Image (cartoon, grey):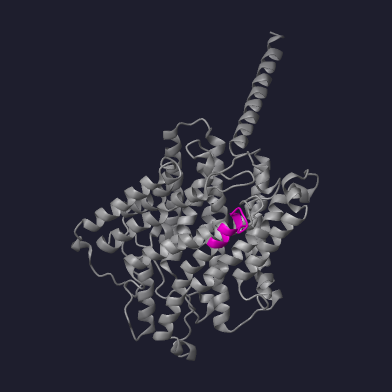
Amino acid sequence: MADSAPAGAGGAGSAAAAAAAAASNYKKLKEDFVSNLSGGSAEEVFLVTAVAPVAILVWSVLQRRHYYFRPYSLLAFVVDFFLNAGAILLATTLYAGQPLLLNGLLLALALFILAVPRCRTRHTSRKRPKTQTHDAGSSPTKTAPHDSSSGSITLPKKAYLTTYRGCMMAVTCLAILAVDFRVFPRRFAKVETWGTSLMDMGVGSFVFSGGIVAARPVLKERASCKSPSLAQRLLASLRHSLPLLVLGIVRLLSVKGLDYAEHTSEYGVHWNFFFTLGLLPPFVAVAQAALQVVPSSAALALVLAGVYQIALETTSLKAYVLTAPRVDLVSKNREGLASFVGYLAIFLAGQDTGMYLLPQPARPANSRSSKKDRGAVAWLRRALSANRLPAWAALWFFLHQLSIRRGPLGLGLTESRRLANLPYVLWVLSFNTQQLTMFYLVDRVVFGERPLAQKHSDRDDAADDEAAAYDYSTSVVLRALNRNGLLLFLIANLLTGAVNMSVPTLDVSQVAAMAILLGYGAVLVALAVALELKDITVRL
């Protein structure tokens, strides 16, 4: 009896040691699973993500021809989810090797829907009532799309921009969990140093889309003829920065405290993406002052990326970022610090894109400028803005090809998300403006320039029509993902951590992996739609 206790204690200790060793080994396997990857081709990334605008085409035809998503029933939500989230999940997993087949199937579905006779019983009044009463399950939207903080200056929304941002959020949130399963091809995961991949593009696209939104306050400032000082801009930027920096600290403590698998060479030992996002606002505020000298944010972005690339090529900076020993706080986080310059350039270029894509703020009806901007002048401005998008897409594509082309006519560089170098910046800008162009074309071809909009002498009626047109031509799922994007990105990270802590993602079968990913996506989208239907916006 006396000898049994030590033996039992020794057995328990051995079991605990074995469990700790197994956990450590599994952590090492997970880190290796996402390390030393070389990615795939930029062309494949384009083909895989093309499923998003093609799926939107199917959604748009359903809505335009059969008014399918009004009222927004449970069945409408299911169809909406599978078109705008399920199709993306399939493209990045089961159909990863056959993106053209999936796109072809979706196009065939769109043609079939066009061939089906209209369901006239669903074509009741399409005009939105002025009161805040809604169909059961419909998405509440304010009749006058304006920001109360801007006073009488309004800034209407554009459906294809919401669709683009919603699809970007869907791809990003699905990929951050899917990458931990074997059903997600390794060529789609982040590359170690040189090359392109789907997830490398996702990071840059998140920053670019944030830049588009950042154009709104600038447009409102210009419309109100108020120019805040640099100190005022920096103070205002802190309101956006502090929550993100806090999230970055919370993530850091969580990862270290839970001994979670991490890829150190991605951003560094302590740095994470929330720190990058949190530091962008004050630097963008400083950049606004530089626009007194530089003609546009896009030009400033090119200057920043170009100077950064010159520093990489002519100094020891590149070698330091890629190979220096991690001996102090700076060297331990050198990837995050160095790549910040590239992400700042991406953000500024996104802001410039927003400046010409977003509609000009609507001024008070009795203002002189509003009277001048009617009729032919307003039509010409809209036409020029629309044509600038494909022109910029072509320009960014040309510059990207010039940066990676070998020979006397090219720079012969290679994209690096780890460095966020010039070719990577140009690739992100080229890709996102191409995506925006496709979403714009789908919206314009299916719905026209202003679907459902009526000409009214009464300004409230015009605003009512504009809000109704926006609601009618945007998916509730994508509208919801766009509305609370940063909050949902945070929740997606938490859910990803929870799944990884409770499921051996490397060992599950393909069927189980798809079930988990589908359930995860459904939970995230359902939460987003619930917030949308309750008209709740959570700003971080």
Q: 417 or 222, which lies in front? A: 417
Q: Is residue 502 above or below residue 485?
A: above
Residue 121 located left or right of residue 428: left
Q: 153 or 536, which lies in front? A: 153
Q: 218 or 299, which lies in front? A: 299
Residue 537 located left or right of residue 341: left
Q: Is residue 185 above or below residue 63?
A: above
Question: Percent from the top left, x then y, of residue 149?
Answer: 54, 76
Name the residue located 66 percent from the left edge and 73 percent from the top edge. Answer: 233
Name the residue located 31 percent from the left edge and 64 percent from the top edge. Answer: 135
Question: Percent from the top left, x then y, of residue 278?
Answer: 65, 59
Q: Is residue 238 above or below residue 293?
A: above
Q: Which residues are magenta?
A: 398-410
Q: Given the current orientation, which residue lies at the most extreme right position?
A: 327
Question: Percent from the top left, x then y, of residue 289?
Answer: 68, 75
Residue 312 among those drawn in magenta? no
Name the residue located 50 percent from the left edge and 42 percent from the top edge. Answer: 178
Residue 263 falls in image quadrant: top right
Residue 532 located left or right of residue 419: left
